Amino acid sequence: MPTLTADSRTDVVSALEALDTRLRWLSSWTVHNANHIREKRDGLKVGGHQASCASMTAIMSALYFHALRPQDKVAVKPHAGPVLQAIHYLLGNQSLDQLQRFRALGGAQSYPSRTKDKIPVDFSTGSVGLGVAITAFSSLVQDYLIAHGQMAEQEAGRMIALMGDAELDEGNIYECLIEGYKHDIRNCWWVVDYNRQSLDSTTADRMFRRFDDIFETCGWRVITLKHGKLQRNVFARPGGQAIADWIDNCPNAEFAALTYQGGAAWRQRLMADIGGAAKVRALLDSFDDDRLAALMTNLGGHCVESLIDAFDSAQDDLPTLFIAYTVKGHGLPLAGHKDNHSGMMNPGQIDQLRQSLSIPVGDEWEPYGGLGDNQAARLKEFVATSALAVKAPEADAPTIPVPARLAFPASDAQSTQAAFGNVLLELAKSDEPLADRIVTTAPDVTQTTNLGAFVNQRGLFRRAEMVDVFRAAKIPSAQKWDGHAAGQHIELGIAENNFFLAMTSLGLAGPHFGTRLIPVGTVYDPFIARGLDALNYGCYSDARFLLVGTPSGLTLGPEGGAHQSINTPLIGMGQPNLTYFEPAWADEVALVMRWAFDYMQQPDGSSVYIRLSTRVIPQMARANDAWEADALKGGYWLKQPEPNADAAIVFTGAIAPEVLRAWEQLVDDVPGIGLLNVTSPDLLHREWSARHASRWTDGKRPQSHVEDLLSVLSPTAGLVTVIDGSPGALSWLGGVKGMRVSPLGIDSFGQTGDLPDLYHRYRLDADAIMDAAAELFL
Ligand SMILES: Cc1ncc(C[n+]2csc(CCOP(=O)(O)OP(=O)(O)O)c2C)c(N)n1
Ligand SMILES: [Mg+2]
């Protein structure tokens, strides 16, 4: 950011003001084109948010073309997406074609998207609140990388959120504030577009100054930009203080309504309320209606001078909240109207706006349309020399080698959760490069999900040294809970939204900072649902992490129905950019984890979710490794059926002992019966349906793995499917070859009990499997 002399400051301010206008026009026109000019085929409203954009154009002009440094990253308020598109259009990073196809197939996206947009997008946004909080976690990740020597301190950027004021209603904002305070985050700015309007209405007056308290309590500096320079100058004139006081006391809804009504209404109201004082009357009389309206709406967030002063004043690394007062729809005929969120200028109104900006008909898309040649050239030059113009695109971070096999201590009986912890412990003790890049995290369930051993070995991450008081006092404990800069576990409080946002930020370290981390996070499987939107957000952003849901299912027994996850297999199957595995034995856990560490790093890979259990079960004696390749494709024959066999039992996960017992009892009566272990219902189903679809797209119809597996059975065979979770995760297998299915699983809430009772009550025991088989096969 350049230091400004008085002269250059005047130039910068006028350039930023001109850019504010350009952004307001281009964003409005982009939305207008999509709704009123582009051909419509389906009668659907295309949509777009002209008022939300206009609310932020000055803020974004001042930020992007003055305050932003190349290393900074910004999350843009979702419905200000067209402003970001316009910025990149001016920078030459966005094509006219993309703008013209805003919200159409293959065109600029409605809300900034890392994966779908052609322009550089640092953070996807859309689900309000998440795009804000993610910046706090990314600043934590940046600190982690600096502390681990993966990034130089001087390369540190600011993680900035441009947010709507209604986003302050989202609970995840406050969860993240608290977590951020605990971790002493820095280099984070949140800029609130404080237009005091949400989607439905104007916001509560009572919140005035409350946000200051909340943020300051959490260690943030709060900078409020309430009045623009014009207002401040007028307030200093005789009679001005009365106007200032009047504005300060005006309820949000009334301010908005007067804004919409315009200059004459402002005058009438001000005269009625404070016009008795002679100096006020004289002051008001010195403004015509238009200038009075401009004065009254000259709020801090529309004044580039106030904005650059505010940004310039916050050059240390303290997290900072800028509350920039704005008018929703500023500069548009929609300004202030409470219904303007989805409101749009009609063709007459946009034409008036065009004329007011001297943009000739036909020049609407001209980046600098309506400006004189000299001014256009100066502005172009200003944009071309902005810090943003030299920002390098995201680079591919080098991949971290993954060992050919992951070691784990074999034992006769163990749980998949214990195996997970053991694999990590072995890695932690190794000098594998992979081990150094693993970052673990959990929302206050580190110990109960078996991450403890890894943490003991690799330590807790803290920027400032943190002594484990219990250890220092020599009080016996299984946990070494010392925190230091080299630690590799990020301790999180119990807020699953934060957990998934942290995983997202960690999983974007590669594209964001050019150096990879391998995030491994554990959560109680049922509480995935608590952070589901943040998980979806992370997947949509194509962040890469290993999610471990454990423990899971009815198999939790005495923990009862509130903790027994039922539908997570369906979440695992239904969530794009997340591949779900549910291993049954320790060797499968090690195999899947190794695969995951590799797959997470592949360009076409994804995040991986493994669903684990605390149930200790006897381990399989394997004759060889032949099962492994199929296991990684989603399933393998644990007991190969005889050719044309009439039956198979299909199962997933820790219910294996019941399934094996049933199989052993059935094999005499149903000769050649197979036993299929589905390690990933997700991979099997996804490949099967993708191959079906490919027939229509590229004319080929290669056989899928699940078809290969099932084609050894008789075409009229029956399947008993068994999973400790929603039976739908496996019952679809009947559709692959048109086989009859008897699906066993959990459809209703569980309850407390021991396993024999629960498996019996919910029909997951060997008897239930045999009953189902008898009905189908015998
Ligand atoms: C999680 C979530 N819930 C609801 C919405 C729908 N929605 C879009 S914008 C918005 C509120 C807009 O208000 P504000 O954040 O103040 O932005 P403004 O348009 O006023 O600038 C809502 C409720 C959403 N995008 N995300
Ligand atoms: Mg708002």
Image (cartoon, rainbow, N blue to C red):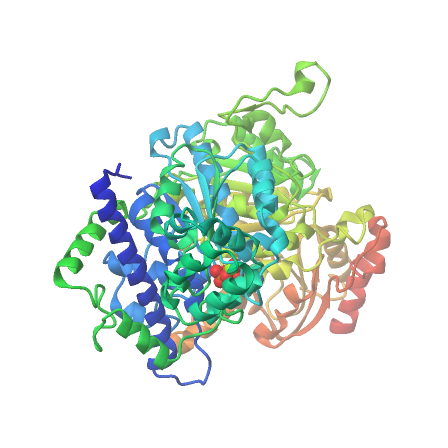
Residue 195, given in percent of the width and then of the height, sits at: 49, 58
Residue positioned most to the front: 278
Horizontal side, residue 106 vs residue 323: left or right: left
Residue closest to the eye, 310 or 398: 310
Q: Which of the 4 image quadrants contains residue 470?
A: top right
Answer yes or no: is residue 582 visible: no
Horizontal side, residue 455 vs residue 758: left or right: left
Which quadrant of the figure contains the C terminus?
A: bottom right
Residue 259, given in percent of the width and then of the height, sits at: 47, 66
Horizontal side, residue 206 vs residue 436: left or right: right
Q: Is residue 281 above or below residue 733?
A: above
Residue 36, given in percent of the width and then of the height, sits at: 37, 80
Residue positioned most to the top: 473
- Residue at left offset 21%, top offset 77%: 362
Answer yes or no: is residue 101 visible: yes
Residue closest to the eye, 233 or 751: 233
Q: Which of the 4 image quadrants contains residue 437?
A: top left
Residue 401, given in percent of the width and then of the height, sits at: 40, 38
Which quadrant of the figure contains the N terminus?
A: top left
Number of disc labels: 0
- Residue at left offset 33%, top offset 81%: 37
- Residue at left offset 85%, top offset 59%: 761
Residue closest to the eye, 340 or 94: 340
